[in-house]
Amino acid sequence: MSPDQLFQLDAQQMFLDWGQPAQLRERRRQFDVESGLLVESKYPVPITVIPLEETPHPVAKMAASLNRTHRQFLVRESELPAGIELSSAQLGWKGLDFEIRGWSRSGQSDLLTLECVTDASPDWGEGHVH
């Protein structure tokens, strides 16, 4: 067995152990001729993610308290729809909508790390580990 095959088996086991359901929503904009408006549609696709590091960032100079949360998610590229534009997609996870700000590929497999941000403040409840 090659090292790459071994890494693929490890990645499969990681997703079995720590994977969580999420929804990838590609946003597409098109001009509606009848209304004369630009219409945005979202096309949801269920995927499995492994949530990684979370970093809350308070937004300065705001009248109300607002936290912008940055979070990384590990996804399998093979699970993404062909031709999806990640730069125009959102990730829905545990009731929060994350904007995808960037991504990087793993050199050994089809894993992507998504760099995401949300303006919502999560209420994780007791027992949640950050």
Image (cartoon, rainbow, N blue to C red):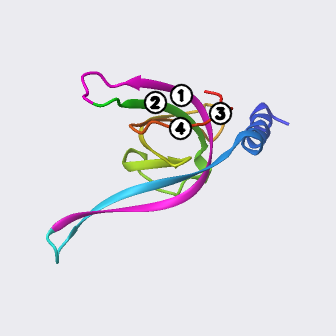
- Kindly identify which numbered label has been placed on residue 70: 2
In the depicted structure, whether residue 125 falls above or below residue 92: above
Residue at disc 3, secondary structure: loop
Circle nearer the viewer, 1 or 3 = 3
Number of residues whose C-alpha sits closer than 10 Å to that of mark 2, classed few (under 14), some (14–19) or many (20 or more): some
Left/right placement of residue 128 relative to residue 24 reads right
Helix, strand, or loop for circle 1?
strand
Q: Position of residue 27 (x, y in %)?
A: 37, 56
- Between discs 3 and 2, the one toward the N terminus: 2
Give the structural element (helix, strand or loop) at label 4. loop
**Amino acid type indicated by mark 4:** Asp
| For marks 2 and 1 on the same chain, the one whose residue lies earlier in the sequence | 1
Residue 34 percent coordinates (x, y):
17, 78
- Spot occupied by residue 12 in the image (x, y as percentages of width and height): 75, 43
Of discs 3 and 2, which sits in the foreground?
3
In magenta stretch: residue 61 = yes
Report the Cα–Cα distance between label 1 and label 3. Answer: 17 Å
| Picture layout, residue 51 above or below residue 78 | above
In the rendered image, which residue does mark 3 sit on? Answer: 126
Question: Which residue, as the protein is rendered here, is positioned at the far bottom?
Answer: 34
Report which residue position mark 1 lands on: 54
Q: Which residues are magenta?
A: 37-63
Whole-angstrom CA distance, mark 4 to mark 2, is: 15 Å
